[in-house]
């Protein structure tokens, strides 16, 4: 499998609770290389754009409010089979269903405040990485 990239965010609760170090530690220990990293805060407009694919879902408004409620940490990660392996490392969307040893099992508080985002396809990884990072911010 070729080396490729995925995109992640550490979500507002996990940043607020001082878990940036522990989560990036799990990411690096999982074999991912951090290609780009920044702490930033989404306006509700930008959060709405990022999650536009969910805009018809009942949880969309709450999700947009939550994701713009405090700073997040955005990262591009590189590894063989990055998208699928990262989804494995973060665990199920609902932390009640996340396996032991996953980031969400350890840090998620609820389905909404579930600690981290992970891209669901190579195409979306590219779109999401481009949403946050310019070419000279990736190494
Ligand atoms: P994932 O983040 O695992 O890819 P998703 O793309 O289906 O999950 O949904 C995006 C985010 O929306 C998810 O991380 C948390 C929130 N969310 C999803 N389903 C939800 C629900 N039933 N209630 C509240 N928030 C939800
Ligand atoms: Mg998703």
Image: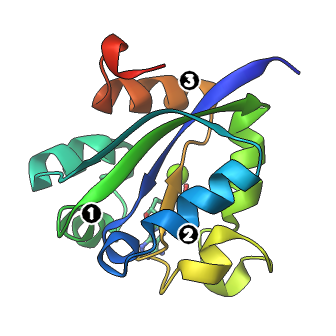
Neighbor class of circle 3 (other Cα within 10 Å; few <14, some 14-19, many 20+) is few
Neighbor class of circle 2 (other Cα within 10 Å; few <14, some 14-19, many 20+) is few
Disc 2: which residue: 22
Extreme residue in the right direction: 1
Residue depicted at x 74% and y 54%: 29
Identify the image quadrant of residue 41.
bottom left
Q: Which mark is residue 123?
A: 3
Query: In terms of depth relative to the viewer, which is nearer, 45 or 109?
Result: 109
- Residue 52 image offset from top left, x and y in percent: 30, 44
What separation in Å lies between label 1 and label 3 (alpha carbons)?
Answer: 22 Å
What separation in Å lies between label 1 and label 2 (alpha carbons)?
Answer: 20 Å
- Residue 11 image offset from top left, x and y in percent: 38, 64
Label 3 lies in ligand 2 vicinity (Cβ under 8 Å):
no
First in sequence: mark 2 or mark 3? 2
| SS at mark 3 in the image | helix
Residue depicted at x 72% and y 77%: 98
Label 2 lies in ligand 1 vicinity (Cβ under 8 Å):
no
Q: Horizontal placement of 16 versus 124: left or right?
A: left
Q: Which mark is residue 67?
A: 1
First in sequence: mark 1 or mark 3? 1
Report the mark closest to the observer, 1 or 2.
2
- 25 vs 132: above or below: below
| SS at mark 2 in the image | helix
């Amino acid at each position: 499998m070729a080396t490729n990239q995925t995109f992640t965010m550490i979500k507002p609760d996990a940043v607020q609770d001082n878990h940036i170090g522990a989560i990036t530690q799990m990411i690096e220990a999982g074999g991912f290389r951090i290609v780009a990293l920044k702490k930033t805060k989404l306006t509700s407009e930008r959060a709405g754009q990022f999650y536009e694919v969910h805009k018809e879902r009942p949880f969309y408004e709450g999700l947009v409010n939550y994701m713009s409620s405090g700073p997040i940490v955005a990262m591009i990660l590189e590894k063989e089979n990055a998208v699928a392996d990262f989804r494995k490392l973060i665990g199920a969307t609902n932390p009640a269903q996340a396996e032991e040893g996953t980031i969400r099992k350890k840090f998620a508080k609820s389905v909404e405040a579930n600690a981290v985002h992970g891209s669901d396809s190579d195409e979306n990884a590219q779109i999401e990485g481009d949403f946050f990072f310019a070419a000279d911010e990736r190494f």
